[in-house]
Image (cartoon, helix red, strand yellow):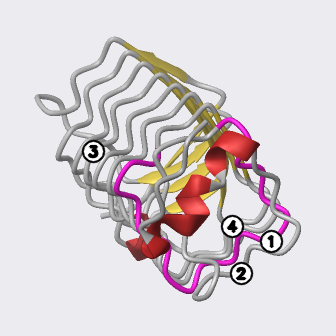
């Protein structure tokens, strides 16, 4: 089957769980209020695209390429971003829910996470240097051998990051967020 090419198209209010999703390259395309939960996006290329108010939960991301893609107000539960095409992966998340997703071993330098729920997200061995977590809930997120150098965690909350097994040099944190770096010591920290 030949891959299709889409340039500058808008896909709005489409339920791709009932309609087939064409495999191919999507360049400068916009997806608005689309249902994509559980579909197969493997091998697709998204270049300079945006997804707004879409449900992408549990989609197959095997060898999917995201290059400069923005997700806004999307439900994205259980996504295995670690299965994506890792070449030049660039995306941002604003007001999304990424609960139970995985970013294992990805280079995500300077990635923007804003107003996003990141419950139990796995960032093991990821490079998040220079990334921003603006007003993000990181409850239960896994940081193990993660590079958080120069990341901005000042308004993030709910995280537990062990500085002995993660790189945190020059990370920006608020005084209220310091307890997230000291959890392993079981200290009773009062405000």
- In space, the residues marked 1 and 2 are separated at their CA atoms by 6 Å
In this rendering, would 71 be left or right of 107?
left
Q: Does any portion of residue 47 appear in the rendered image? A: no
The residue depicted at 64 percent of the width and 78 percent of the height is 163
User: Closer to the N terminus: mark 1 or mark 2?
Assistant: 1
Extent of the magenta region = 138-155
Q: Which residue is mark 4?
A: 128
User: Closer to the N terminus: mark 2 or mark 4?
Assistant: 4
User: Closer to the N terminus: mark 4 or mark 1?
Assistant: 4
Q: Which residue is mark 3?
A: 77
Farthest-out residue, top: 13
Q: Position of residue 64 (x, y in %)?
A: 45, 64
Looking at the rendered image, the quarter that the C terminus falls into is top right
Is the residue 43 above or below the residue 15 in the image? below
Q: Which residue is mark 1?
A: 149
Nearest the eye: 165 or 27: 165
Q: Which structural element holds mark 1?
A: loop
User: Principal SS element in the magenta part?
Assistant: loop
Which of the two marks, 2 or 3, is nearer to us in this view? 2
- In space, the residues marked 3 and 4 are separated at their CA atoms by 20 Å
Farthest-out residue, left: 18
Q: Position of residue 76 (x, y in %)?
A: 34, 41
Q: Which structural element holds mark 2?
A: loop
Q: Which residue is mark 2?
A: 167
Looking at the rendered image, the quarter that the N terminus falls into is bottom left
């Amino acid at each position: 089957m030949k891959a299709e090419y889409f340039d500058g198209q808008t896909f709005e209010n489409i339920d791709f769980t009932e309609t087939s999703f064409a495999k191919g390259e999507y360049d400068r395309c916009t997806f608005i209020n689309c249902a994509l939960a559980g579909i197969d996006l493997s091998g697709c290329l998204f270049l300079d695209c945006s997804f707004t108010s879409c449900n992408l939960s549990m989609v197959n991301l095997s060898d999917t390429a995201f290059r400069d893609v923005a997700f806004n107000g999307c439900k994205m539960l259980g996504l295995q971003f670690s299965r994506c095409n890792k070449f030049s992966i660039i995306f941002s998340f604003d007001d999304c829910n990424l609960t139970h997703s995985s970013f294992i071993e990805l280079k995500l330098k300077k990635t923007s996470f804003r107003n996003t729920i990141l419950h139990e997200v796995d960032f093991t061995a990821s490079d998040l240097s220079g990334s921003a977590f603006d007003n993000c809930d990181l409850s239960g997120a896994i940081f193990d051998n993660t590079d958080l150098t120069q990341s901005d965690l000042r308004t993030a909350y709910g995280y537990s990051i062990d500085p002995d097994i993660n790189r945190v040099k020059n990370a920006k944190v608020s005084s209220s967020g310091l307890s997230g770096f000291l959890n392993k010591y079981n200290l009773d920290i009062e405000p």
